[in-house]
Amino acid sequence: MRRLVLTIYVAMFPFLAVRGDESGGQQTVQRMSNDKNGLQYLLYLPDNYGAQKRWPLVLFLHGSGERGDRIDRVKKHGPPKLVAAGERFPFILVSPQCPMDHRWDVRQLGSLLNQLEAKYKVDRDRIYVTGLSMGATGTWALIASDPDRFAAIAPVCGRGDPETTKSFATTPTWVFHGAKDPTVPISESQRMVDALKVAGGKPKFTVYPNAKHDSWTAAYSSSEFYDWLLSQKRK
């Protein structure tokens, strides 16, 4: 993968709801089927999507500030922001939007993944979940609810329940946090990393010594992160 470069953010308007199933390089607005209250989400399909049988899928969970019904908010941070700025990824990227005043619902996210697997060319051995802040908390909860589904996880500055780590200790995990985070203390990530190690896991833990709550800009701008993520396969 070419080196990621943060360019000027040029996506000034939300995308219209179109299918875009056979083309890459854009994010289209979709909604869960057969559910009027289903999550809306941004869908990115890689270039040459139609030329390959199966693709890795990355599920990105945003933070609390991007909740609501304006889907363009989801492009504020993380991989969907990079796509809006012109980045191209060799995977399917799905970025749902959590409703206002709600938290991520693992059952709803599981249903979304079921629909995505049925509709798109998803490599079921290469499904990944990552998120920032509230989305990282959702990441920890989602892997705990379905530990055999994901090839790897990457929570960025979130909270989790250490008691759940035994069920997914062997899942490749890369945790990110800012040492000076005043919103979610770094101790929240540290205790999850420690619990994984006690349970027999070997998590990676990157601490940005001068970062506050925004540890995600550095994390998601790293080509090393994407190379690591895509090298993981479900065992």
Image (cartoon, rainbow, N blue to C red):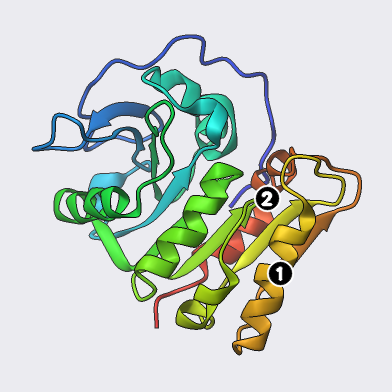
Residue lying at 54% horizontally and 33% vertically, measured from the top left: 64
Type of the residue with mark 2 = Cys
Count of residue discs: 2
* Residue 137 rendering spot, x and y as whole percentages: 54, 52
Kindly report which numbered mark, 1 or 2, lies closer to the viewer in this rendering: 1
* Residue 159 rendering spot, x and y as whole percentages: 61, 55
Q: Which residue bears the numbered disc 2?
A: 157
Q: Earlier in the sequence, mark 1 or mark 2?
A: 2
Q: Which quadrant would the C terminus be assigned to in this image?
A: bottom left
Could you tell me which secondary element the residue under label 2 belongs to?
A: loop
Residue lying at 70% horizontally and 59% vertically, measured from the top left: 188
Q: Horizontally, is 199 left or right of 89 in the view?
A: right
Report which quarter residue 95 is drawn in. Answer: top left
Category of crowding for the residue at label 1, using alpha-carbon neighbours closer than 10 angstroms: few (below 14), some (14–19), many (at least 20)? some
* Residue 109 rendering spot, x and y as whole percentages: 31, 50
Report which quarter residue 33 is drawn in. Answer: top left
Residue 58 in the image: above or below residue 16: below
Whether residue 150 is visible to the viewer of this picture, yes or no, is no
Q: Horizontally, is 189 left or right of 43 in the view?
A: right
In the displayed orientation, state which residue is furthest to the top. Answer: 13
**Mark 1 and mark 2: Cα distance apart in space:** 12 Å
Which mark is drawn over residue 82? none
Residue lying at 34% horizontally and 40% vertically, measured from the top left: 45
Q: Horizontally, is 136 left or right of 34 in the view?
A: right
Could you tell me which secondary element the residue under label 1 belongs to?
A: helix
Q: Which residue bears the numbered disc 1?
A: 191
Type of the residue with mark 1 = Arg
* Residue 49 rendering spot, x and y as whole percentages: 29, 46
Residue lying at 55% horizontally and 43% vertically, measured from the top left: 134
Residue 47 in the image: above or below residue 228: above
Residue 150 in the image: above or below residue 109: below
Whether residue 119 is visible to the viewer of this picture, yes or no, is yes
